Each structure stands twice: as C-alpha cells, then as structure tokens.
Image (cartoon, grey):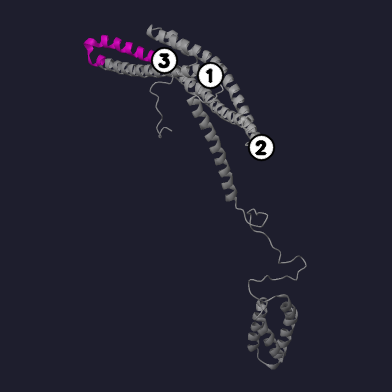
C-alpha cells in the first residue's frame, strides 16, 4: 500500500514543473528496492523511504503555490519580500504626456531644422542688404577712419608679399651660386693634384672659392632668417588681423540688415505690424549691434598693435640684411660673423645628413 501511494504521488508530481527533482529521487529509491534481497531488508527499505518523504517538501503546499498556465502569464510569489509582478521600465527613450515614445533622433532632427531655418533667414537678409548696397539703394554704416586703416593694411600686405617673393628668389639664386662655387673649388683642387706645373695657380683659386663658399653660407643663414621673419609678419601676423577685419565686415553687414528691417517695421502702419514682431526685430538688432561694436573695437586694437610690431620687426630685419650683404661683398669676414652673433643666428653645419639606421 505504501509503495502505491508513493508511485501515485510521484506521477502527480511529473505534471508540476517544480517537482521534477522529487520524482527522480523516488525512481532512484525504487531501483534500489529491486536490488534488495530478503524479507528483513524490505522493512528497512520501507522505513528509509518513509523518512525521506517526511524530510522532503510538502507536495500539497507546493501545488498551491505554483500557478500553472501559459508562459505569457506572470508567476506570483508567496514571499513577503515583495511582489514578483513589479513592472520595471527597460526603455531609456523619453516619453510624451500621452505615453508615446520620443526618440532622441527626432529631437536632434528638430534642433538641426531650427538651426538651418535660422541660418537661412540670416543669410537671406544679409544677401538682400549686400545687393542693396551694391545697387546704391540701401544705407550702409561707414567708419571713415577705420576703413582707411584697413585699406592701408591690405595695401601693405600686398607690398610685403612682393618683398618676400623677391627675397626668396634672391635666396634661391644665391644658394645656386654657393653650390656652384663649392663645385668649382673641388674641381680646382683636383686639377692642382693632377697638374704639377699649375699646382700653385689651381691651389690659390681653390682657396678663394672655399672662402667664398664659407662666407656665402653665412650670408645664406642671414637671408633665410630675413625671409622667415618677413613670411611670419606677412602671412601670419597681418593675416590674423585681416581675419578679424573680415569678421568685422560680416558683422557690419548683419548689423545694417537688421537695422534696416527694424526701421522699416517701425515706419510701417500699426495696423499691419504687430507689436511682438517689432519687439523681436529690435531684440535681434540689439544683439547684432553688440557684436558689431565689439568687433570694431577689436579691429582698432589689432591695427594699433600690428603697426607697432611691424616697425620693431622691420627695423631689426632691415639692419640685419644690410650688414650681412655689405660684409659679404666687401670681404669682411669678421663683420659678417659679428652680424650673426648680434642677431643670435645659428647656422646649420654644412653637409649634415641624417644618420643611418645602423648608426642609430
């Protein structure tokens, strides 16, 4: 009777998901019973089986706790720690007031659309103002003194660029001369060894060419320093100031465009123009006015500093160029060396080559 009850309970446990382990235990015990021989051993087996079933979980309680049904349903818990049916939001997407999802891509697209819209309106107004100025139909804000200084700067940059171009050409030609003198000195030295009857004449001509090469390399160092400084002054310092000037001119165009728009709205009839539209136009005009005045002050300061810096730099460079060229063509080696020391010019050693990977 006891074995029948156990087998019946084990059969019922196969239909419950949480009782598989108990079923396997019963089968293992039944298999062990087949291996038992003798009547006394049967009583011992039944006693051990009864103890195992008493120590195990209550089948009725487990059946009441576990809810059967489809996988779509939520399993409840009998533990007091909390409900297993708590809902946790796994989505990081923002939601609107009615519960709809608003992806970040939509917000980004809206921001880009607003930026493009603002840029388009501003570009249209500036283009309209530019065309009106070209046709002589629009008013333009002009600072005569500042405009004159800007025109002087642009003309000065063109002239300094021409000086730089000529100095580079002279440097290139003179470098070819020095290389030719070096090759000529080597040829004289070779012929002095092969022609005993003209050895003395070839020798002092070789020494002369070598001296010219030495002084020529010193002059090349001074000329390279001169062209490098002029290039910095022309293409960096002046160009930086002109960049601020271009920003100032763009701000002036925007300022005039919004100024003319505000004046047109103020002169229009009140019936056709709303107060909010006039206030918005005035607010934008004030913003561009602040930007325009700031850039105008920046241009004035940069022009002043540029002029002072240009005078100092050119005074030094023109003195260097004059002393170096004069010392070279007069053959004054000591004056040429003194000129380099005066302006802290260091020459690169001749025939300097990068060491090979074996030497490294």
180 horizontally vs 248: left or right: left
The dot on residue 310 is none
Please say if the residues under marks 1 and 2 sit with CB atoms less than 8 Å apart: no
Residue matched to label 3: 218
The alpha-carbon separation of the residues under discs 3 and 1 comes to 43 Å
Label 2, residues with CA under 10 Å away: few <14, some 14-19, many ≥20: few
Residue matched to label 1: 147
Asked whether 272 or 91 is in front, the reply is 272
Label 1, residues with CA under 10 Å away: few <14, some 14-19, many ≥20: few
Q: Please identify, in this view, whether the residue under mark 3 or under mark 1 is nearer the observer.
A: 1
Asked whether 299 or 52 is in front, the reply is 299
Q: How many marks can you see? A: 3
Residue in view at x 38 percent, y 23 percent? 351
In terms of sequence position, does the residue under pointer 1 or pointer 2 come before the other? Answer: 1
Q: Residue 162: image x %, image y %?
A: 41, 18
Q: Main secondary structure of the magenta part?
A: helix
The alpha-carbon separation of the residues under discs 2 and 3 comes to 73 Å
Q: Residue 16: image x %, image y %?
A: 66, 79
Asked whether 24 or 12 is in front, the reply is 12
Residue matched to label 2: 276
Q: Is residue 164 above or below residue 26?
A: above
Q: Residue 231: image x %, image y %?
A: 46, 21
Q: Please identify, in this view, whether the residue under mark 2 or under mark 3 is nearer the observer.
A: 2
In which quarter of the view is residue 296 placed? top right
Q: Check the picture and name the quadrant holding the C terminus.
A: top left
Helix, strand or loop at mark 2 = helix
Residue 197 on the magenta segment:
yes
């Amino acid at each position: 009777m006891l074995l029948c009850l156990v087998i019946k309970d084990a059969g019922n446990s196969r239909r419950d998901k949480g009782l598989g382990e108990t079923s396997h235990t019963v089968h293992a015990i039944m298999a062990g019973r087949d291996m038992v021989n003798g009547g006394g051993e049967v009583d011992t087996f039944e006693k051990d089986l009864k103890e195992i079933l008493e120590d195990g979980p209550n089948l009725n309680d487990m059946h009441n706790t576990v809810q059967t049904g489809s996988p779509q349903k939520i399993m409840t818990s009998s533990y007091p720690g909390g409900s297993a049916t708590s809902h946790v939001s796994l989505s990081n997407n923002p939601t609107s007031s009615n519960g709809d999802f608003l992806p970040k891509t939509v917000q980004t697209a809206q921001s880009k659309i607003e930026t493009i819209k603002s840029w388009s309106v501003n570009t249209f107004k500036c283009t309209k103002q530019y065309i009106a100025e070209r046709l002589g139909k629009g008013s333009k804000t002009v600072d005569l003194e500042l405009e004159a200084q800007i025109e002087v700067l642009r003309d000065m940059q063109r002239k300094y660029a021409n000086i730089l171009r000529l100095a580079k050409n002279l440097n290139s030609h003179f470098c070819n001369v020095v290389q030719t003198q070096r090759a000529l000195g080597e040829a004289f030295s070779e012929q002095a060894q092969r022609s005993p009857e003209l050895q003395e004449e070839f020798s002092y001509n070789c020494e002369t060419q070598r001296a010219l090469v030495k002084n020529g390399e010193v002059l090349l160092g001074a000329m390279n320093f001169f062209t490098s400084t002029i290039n910095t002054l022309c293409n960096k310092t002046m160009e930086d100031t002109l960049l601020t000037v271009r920003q100032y001119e763009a701000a002036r165009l925007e300022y005039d465009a919004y100024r003319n728009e505000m004046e047109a709205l103020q002169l229009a009839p009140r019936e056709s123009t709303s107060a909010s539209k006039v206030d918005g136009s005035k607010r934008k005009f004030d913003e561009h006015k602040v930007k325009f005045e700031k850039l105008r002050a920046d241009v004035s300061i940069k022009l002043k500093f540029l002029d002072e810096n240009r005078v100092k730099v050119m005074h030094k460079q023109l003195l260097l160029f004059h002393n170096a060229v004069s010392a070279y063509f007069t053959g004054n080696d000591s004056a040429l060396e003194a000129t380099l020391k005066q302006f802290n010019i260091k020459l690169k050693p001749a025939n300097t080559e990068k060491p090979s990977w074996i030497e490294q």
